[in-house]
Amino acid sequence: MARTVRDELLAALDDLNEDNFERFCGKIRDWEIERGYRKIPRRMLEKAKTGDVVDQILSHYTNSYGPELTVDVLDAINQKDVALDLKKALEKVKGFTWRKKPEEEPPSTSEASSSSAPNTQEEHFVDKHRKALIANCALVDPILDGLFSEDLLTQEQYDSIRAEKYSQEKMRKLYEYIKGWPVSGKQTLYNILKEENGPLIKNLEQS
């Protein structure tokens, strides 16, 4: 039977000893991933087996970016031989080709403008619509999960917000932490809000 991308990723990670596999999971979690992708939630990597990690890589980063990312992370944790073997093996997989890496945008182009998000040069969307978001954002827990997975909330902050009973109280508590975030953090929040509370965000953008 023909080998697949998943087969080769699984074989590569199975070559790692326990310590190096833990290092791999920690490194891929902290890796600065490309724009347009979301990091694998921490809980999905804790105590995960190799097959589970491979499935998360392919689910979050696809058969295109996932293999490239895996090779880069293996190389970064000094598993260069495993990375090289994986690269050679992937090139033999039928239908697999290394993708052309996206070109970096010029400094004048912000992430916000490239993704049709709010203009980060002005007051950010999450600041401008603070009152409306606190009052109307019903699905707060998925937002917190997303922010926690992106390391924008500490465990203590996450637990503190979750302890609030009502959605408005959770959002109000969240904004206590948001005010100290850089634009990139607020942009991540905007992206999660759009994913979890799409109709609300659309209405606010049109108001």
Image: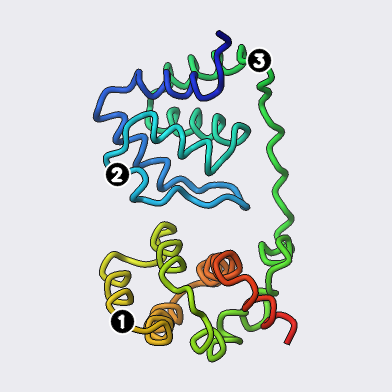
Instruction: Give left or right: position of 132 versus 31.
Output: right
Q: Amino acid at mark 1?
A: Glu
Residue under numbered circle 1: 164
Quadrant showing the C terminus: bottom right
Say few, some or many: other residues with alpha carbon within 10 Å of mark 3 (under 14 / 14 to 19 / 20 or more): few
- Picture coordinates of residue 3, whole percent (x, y): 55, 13
- Considering the numbered disc 3 on the image, is that residue within a helix, a strand or a loop? loop
The residue beneath circle 2 is 46
Q: Earlier in the sequence, mark 1 or mark 3?
A: 3
Element type at mark 2? loop
Residue named by callout 3: 94
Spatial CA distance of label 2 from label 3 is 32 Å
**Labelled pair 1, 3 in contact (Cβ < 8 Å):** no
Tell me the tag on residue 146. Answer: none
* Residue positioned 40% across, 79% down in the render: 174
Q: Counting residues from the N terminus, which is met first, the one under dot 2 or under dot 3?
A: 2
Q: Is residue 198 above or below residue 174?
A: above
How far apart, in angstroms, are the residues tagged by discs 1 and 3? 52 Å
Q: Is residue 5 left or right of residue 146?
A: right
Q: Position of residue 26 (x, y in %)?
A: 34, 42
Q: Is residue 75 left or right of residue 4?
A: left
Q: Position of residue 40 (x, y in %)?
A: 45, 48
